Image (cartoon, grey):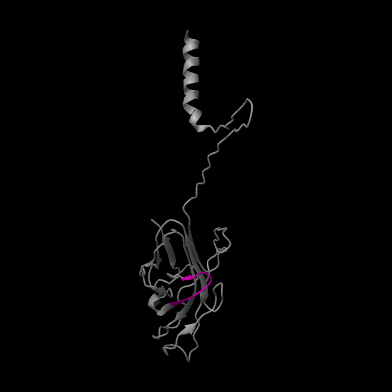
Amino acid sequence: MKTSIALKALLGAASMALPLVTFAESNVQSGGGTLTATAHVDFSIVIPQILYLRVGTGSSYTTGALSSNPAIDLITFSPTAAQVGSGAAITGTGGDITGSTETAAIVSNFGNVTLIATATGALGDGAGDSIPFTQITTTATSNTFATTLQAPTLANGTSNTITLNAPATKVIQADAKWAFSYANTTTPPAGTYGGVNVNNSRVVYTASMP
């Protein structure tokens, strides 16, 4: 008796699981004259939410195959003694496009996207001197997509917010060439300010999608 009850319970559990199993349909028709048999198949495609952000060296984003790339670029500005504090903007070195210019891109498929840039403070030289991030400007020009991705204005903390409003398709494709310049409107003490993730050098760009 106990075995029978256990078997019934097992069969009941199996029947509950049946909706999770996919079955093929068959239809048999017989008789004379014209015969018509039909079978049905249901399809489902599940698309995940995607948010891609690139600033500088990174993976391709125009081929449809998106991937991550951990490379972090270094932009360096080196004004000459005659240029320091002159107010003439200085172009730097570095960047995946070179000449202190970086590729910037956002690709998403689920509504509006916001973009901010965050620094932990002014660029320091390790000796108590600093240069504010407001001395580094960013100019965005068109790249591949029809929508040019504007750049946040750098600050000694959190920048302004760039908002990309999704079209009816909900898909955003925006990119740009971001050219960084040193405004050079002050005369700081001699030294190296920032570096490779030292002295508040690193800016974190963050794209968010609801």
Where is residue 124 drawn, in percent x and y? 41, 74
Start-end of magenta stretch: 138-147
Q: Is residue 29 magenta?
A: no
Q: In the rendered image, is residue 146 in sight?
A: yes
Q: Front-most of 176 and 75?
A: 176
Q: Is residue 140 magenta?
A: yes
Identify the residue shown where x is 56% and y is 74%.
97
- Judged left or right of residue 96, residue 82 is left
Q: Is residue 171 left or right of residue 23?
A: left
- Of 88 and 165, which appears nearest the observer? 165
Q: Which residue in the rendered view is the most extreme toward the right?
A: 32
Residue at (48, 89) in percent of width and height: 81
As drawn, 147 above or below 8? below
Where residue 175 sits in the image (x, y, percent)? 49, 69
Quick check: 140 above or below 161? below
Question: Would you identify the image quadrant in which residue 113 lies?
Answer: bottom left
